[in-house]
């Protein structure tokens, strides 16, 4: 098996064996953080940000540096790119030229930088079509694969008895993905990636949300197929408390409704106003008490007081900072396997 040259647009594109290889290397890199400093020596990784970030830019820059390379920050406004309304360089030309310079390309495109759900996915896959270097999604409107890897890595670390890292520790455990009200109109990427990778590792998945907040039907179908293949189950509910019962991992996060785009415009303010009406959809201590001593997880940034209360987010069963740290290690592993000369063991 080799991952050299592979794109990572969603974890669903990689086999279970390939995901395990990435996680295995990420764990090794976490234990020996500065032991891989020649993997991308003197090489450049392009980071193409349509949307700003906190952890994504920091973690990818640190990852490139710790692998001996360099991460270069790029923005559309600093490049002459063709759009629907302006002349400029096509994706084909940009991707082919970038391939002559860098060892890999990361792209981040979310919410207000697309005019309809799915456009971000289309853009990244078009870059991947033309690029001769690996293309990695740094989060787009449908998927967030590096977050998914960091998530499952953190849940395994927390749920492995006696410490260590045993992927089988999450099999049969219940993952609750629950909508949270808030002042942010967020994309579906992290939520949908969590459902996919959790189900790939045999977790029972429950999705809880108010009526009107349905997720992508195709991702629901894939999650169901993953669950079926791994002896797990998928359930959905509109009951704010029902999903918590028996949960081992609770993922409370806001996401936009299917009506977020109208006539090519992102309806951010309307989405926020609509979401803030559902004040009972918050992860708090009484709801967590219904679980099987569940851990709380979130990709951050957290809308505290809306998606989750402070006592849960900062509580003893919160894994948010471990998952955030794991972004670094998971991304180093992905970059080493796809852009360097490191081969899976």
Image (cartoon, rainbow, N blue to C red):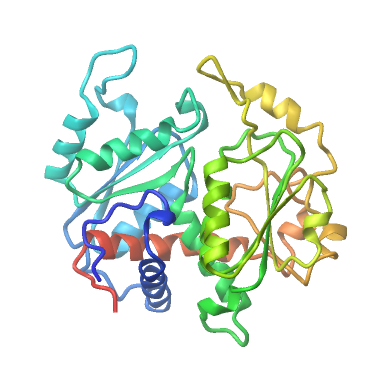
Residue appearing at x 61%, y 21% in the figure: 267
Q: Quadrant of the N terminus?
A: bottom left
User: Residue pushed farthest bottom?
Assistant: 162
Above or below — where is 172 with respect to 118?
below
Return the residue found at the far top.
Answer: 85
Q: Seen in the image, is 61 located left or right of residue 287? A: left
Placement of the C terminus among the 4 image quadrants:
bottom left
Q: Quadrant of residue 250?
A: bottom right
Is residue 76 rendered to the left or right of residue 258?
A: left
In percent of the image, x 29 and y 13: which residue is there? 86
Q: Is residue 160 above or below residue 116?
A: below
* Foreground residue among 48 and 115: 115
Q: Nearer the viewer, residue 12 or 339?
A: 12
Depth order, front residue of 165/174? 174
Rendering coords of residue 118 (x, y %): 46, 33
The number of numbered badges drawn on the structure is: 0
Q: Residue, x 61% and y 88% (percent of image)?
A: 162
- Residue at 43% across, 75% down: 27
Q: Is residue 240 visible?
A: yes
Residue 265 position in % (x across, y down) = 53, 18
Q: Residue furthest right?
A: 286
44 versus 65 height, above or below: above
Q: Does residue 151 appear in the picture of this structure? A: no
The spot of residue 333 in percent (x, y) is 34, 66
Q: Looking at the picture, tell me which residue is in the foreground, 28 or 159.
A: 159
Q: Position of residue 94 (x, y in %)?
A: 20, 32
Figure quadrant of residue 212: top right
């Amino acid at each position: 098996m080799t991952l050299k040259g592979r794109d990572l647009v969603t974890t669903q594109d990689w086999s279970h064996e390939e995901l395990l290889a990435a996680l295995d290397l990420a764990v090794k890199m976490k234990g020996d953080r500065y032991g891989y400093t020649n993997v991308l020596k003197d090489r450049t990784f392009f980071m193409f940000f349509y949307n700003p970030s906190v952890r994504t830019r920091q973690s990818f820059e640190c990852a490139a540096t710790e692998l001996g390379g360099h991460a270069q920050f790029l923005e559309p406004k600093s490049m002459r790119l063709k759009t629907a309304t302006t002349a400029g360089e096509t994706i084909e030309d940009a991707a082919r030229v970038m391939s002559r310079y860098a060892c890999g390309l990361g792209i981040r495109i979310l919410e207000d930088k697309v005019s309809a759900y799915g456009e971000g996915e289309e853009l990244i896959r078009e870059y991947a079509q033309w690029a001769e270097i690996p293309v990695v999604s740094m989060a787009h409107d449908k998927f967030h694969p590096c977050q998914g890897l960091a998530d499952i890595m953190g849940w395994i670390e927390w749920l492995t008895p006696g410490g260590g890292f045993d992927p089988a520790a999450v099999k049969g455990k219940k993952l609750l993905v629950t909508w949270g009200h808030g002042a942010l109109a967020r994309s579906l990427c992290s939520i949908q990636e969590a459902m996919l990778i959790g189900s790939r590792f045999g977790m029972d998945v429950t999705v809880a949300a108010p009526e009107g907040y349905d997720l992508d039907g195709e991702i629901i179908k894939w999650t169901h197929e993953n669950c079926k293949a791994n002896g797990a189950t998928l359930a959905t509910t509109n009951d704010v408390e029902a999903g918590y019962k028996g949960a081992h991992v609770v993922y409370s996060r806001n996401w936009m409704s299917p009506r977020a785009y109208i006539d090519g415009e992102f309806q951010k303010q309307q989405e926020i106003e609509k979401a803030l009406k559902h004040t009972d959809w918050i992860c708090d201590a009484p709801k967590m008490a219904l679980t099987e001593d569940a851990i709380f997880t979130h990709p951050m940034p957290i809308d505290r007081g809306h998606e989750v209360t402070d006592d849960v987010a900062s509580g003893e069963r919160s894994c948010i900072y471990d998952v955030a740290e794991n972004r670094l290690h998971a991304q180093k592993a992905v970059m080493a396997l796809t852009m360097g000369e490191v081969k899976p063991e």
